Amino acid sequence: MPLEGTPFNVVEGARTWLLISMIVLFGGLLVGLLVASLGHRSLERGLVSWFRHLRDGVGDLAGLSGRRVLALALHAVKESIHRKVLYVFVIFAVLFLFAGWYLDNPTTTREQMKYYVTFVLKASSWLTLLVGLLLSCFSLPTDIRTQTIHTVITKPVRRSEIVLGRVAGFTTLGTLILLVMGSVSLIFVVRGVNHPHTLDRGKLTLFQGDTAISEGHRHTVRLDAAGNGQTDEVAGHTHRVVGFEVEAAESHTHALDRGALRRPSDQGATSENSGHLHHIVVDANGNGATDHQLGHFHEIRDFSVGRPQDQLVARVPIYGTVSFRNREGKEVDRGVSVGHVWDYRSYLEGGTKMAAIWRFRNLPVENLRALAQRENGSISMEMTLEVYRSYKGDVTADILAQIELISPQTRRRSRPIVVGVKEAPHFTIQAIPRQLVDVEGKPLDLFDDLMAGRELIVEVSCASPQQYLGMAQADLYLRAGDGSFTANFLKSLAGVWLQMFLMICVGVVTSTFLSGPVAGLTTLAVILGGSIMPFMRDVGLEKMPGALESLIRLIGGQGELVPLDPNAWNTMAQGIDKVFRHVIVALTYVLPDLGSLDTAAFVANGFDIPLWPMPELGVRGVVLHLLLTIGYCVPYTILGYFSIKVREIAR
């Protein structure tokens, strides 16, 4: 799964948040002083009013009552239900009723699980956010317009408790809606990707071998579990085999040595379902497994095919840091470019010194050792490699990738492991056995020799001359087992919940000083800006042209790499774009990064959502997502309190 997040520093990010919070705080205080002075037409009276509001604000925060906030939250829930917000379940049900028409299309079976998971998480997210948007932005302005707010503010409640009560109430209702949708979605995914296969025992071949020579010839036999079958045709005749005994034909028979029979590599296949079938390998008792097709396999017990395995998974990857070696053997940050617009992957030229080098540090060696004991003495290294052919030649021939395992301490190398790579981005699972052999032919232990010091180097190169292999940071990892798919699904729903909570906070705050429609549009703008945060960063940091420059290029039919003519109009357009770039950069520090809270891609691609951040990969993790949400919601809530504090809503 491509990870295109920007690497970050947690400590530096915390300092930036503190600095921005202080700037916004002092800016808000100055704006409040200016508004108070203009309202009283006197700086002195405005300053007195400003100090009074600050003093009341501190008193309100110190005197918050949990019981009153809870009562206001329950009132908000009842009010929302009265407004028939639960009709959203009707839309949800309609979506799921007709989703199967499109998600069960056999032409999309290869990505079926990905489609199911993405659909249910996006549907739950959009509907929950829609409910939160309508409730948070229109509830308070509607109450003020209809004067029903008087039934609340005439009670002994604080303005801060009104804001917190609304946020808590709408969040509670949204949480209940999300729990119902999430439960139905999980059942929908599990049932949707589950598909049965059957076996016809009479068509299976469990034994294969040759008969003894008789009448100057022998026959090859293929038998089922009971020893029944048919020989091949030799000398114009065949023999029937019953119970491992060859029946006579053409006035002769053949002896059959049961001990010499072997298990064939292709014993048969399952029935076809969901656009595919599986070839099987079982023993005489009918126990075994199918091959991998479309990212999954099935266990077989007593000739009965079980549920899909390795499909609804949550891989726990161990990532390393990648660097590259160029043609001269020097270490560089990236490989060569082959001209692709999407430059996520760097490429290695085959038959040269070029290589991609992954360094794994702080490896959980004991956990990997225990995993190897459960997995027949090996661990899994999973890779996604992309091919670029400088010449076609035999397009059916694989491009060869060469993998070497190196100890950082002793520099001992394993013998190269060669993997064939297909044309498209090729995902492969390479089993790394514990017992290896080094380049000198000496025994090499994966854990005791190569991972000594809890470190390991994996070096990948292209062994096909004049061809290229593409790879990126997240394209190679060690698989440290699997987590629970259900728990992973719930962690993704937690990201949806954080998005909803953020949006409710923004909606309630904007509704304290704006009308319902304007608050809705403002909140929608915040959501849109937060969803395209990477794009805004690229524009602000001049990684792509600005708006006016793009318009000029569009009208003139000029590509992004073609320099603009240095005339007055183009210079002025670039100058205006530069001013707006500073505004966009400032917005990236103020708007919440809602896109990072969307973790559906992890679940859809079968990867565990990490709890803790991985800064080098740009992955924040659940804990940091929670802290970021709190970091945004606290200032928003304070702004909402002071907005409703100075608003004359009781007249």
Image: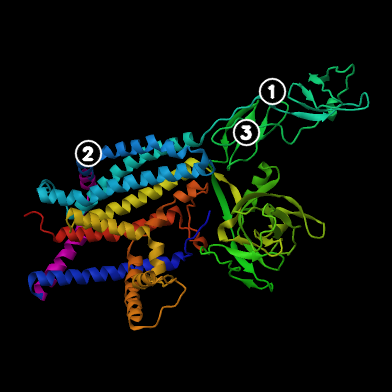
- Tell me if residue 378 comes above or below residue 414 in the rendering: above
Left or right of 650, for residue 213: right
Q: Nearer the viewer, residue 587 or 504?
A: 587
Q: Quadrant of residue 228?
A: top right
Residue stretch rendered in magenta on the structure: 43-72
The residue pinned by badge 3 equals: 299
Q: Amino acid at mark 1?
A: Gly
Query: Which color scheme did the rendering employ for the protein?
Result: rainbow
Left or right of 240, for residue 407: left
Q: Residue at x 74, y 28 (%)?
A: 206
Within 10 Å of disc 2 (Cα), the crowding (few <14, some 14-19, many 20+) is few
Q: Amino acid at mark 3?
A: Glu
Residue 512 picture location, percent across and down:
18, 56
Mark 3: which secondary structure?
strand
- Tell me if residue 131 comes above or below residue 340 in the rendering: above
The residue pinned by badge 2 equals: 84
Residue 329 picture location, percent across and down:
69, 72
Within 10 Å of disc 1 (Cα), the crowding (few <14, some 14-19, many 20+) is few
The residue pinned by badge 1 equals: 202
- Tell me the CA gap for discs 3 and 2: 48 Å
Residue 65 lies in the magenta-colored region: yes
Q: Residue at x 18, y 53 (%)?
A: 516
**Mark identifier at residue 48:** none
Left or right of 42, for residue 639: right
Question: If you read the primary sequence from the N terminus, does the residue marked by circle 1 or circle 2 appear first?
Answer: 2
Residue 234 seen anywhere in this rendered image of the structure: yes
**From the viewer's perspective, is the residue at label 1 or at label 3 nearer?**
1
Q: Are marks 1 and 2 in contact (CB under 8 Å)?
A: no
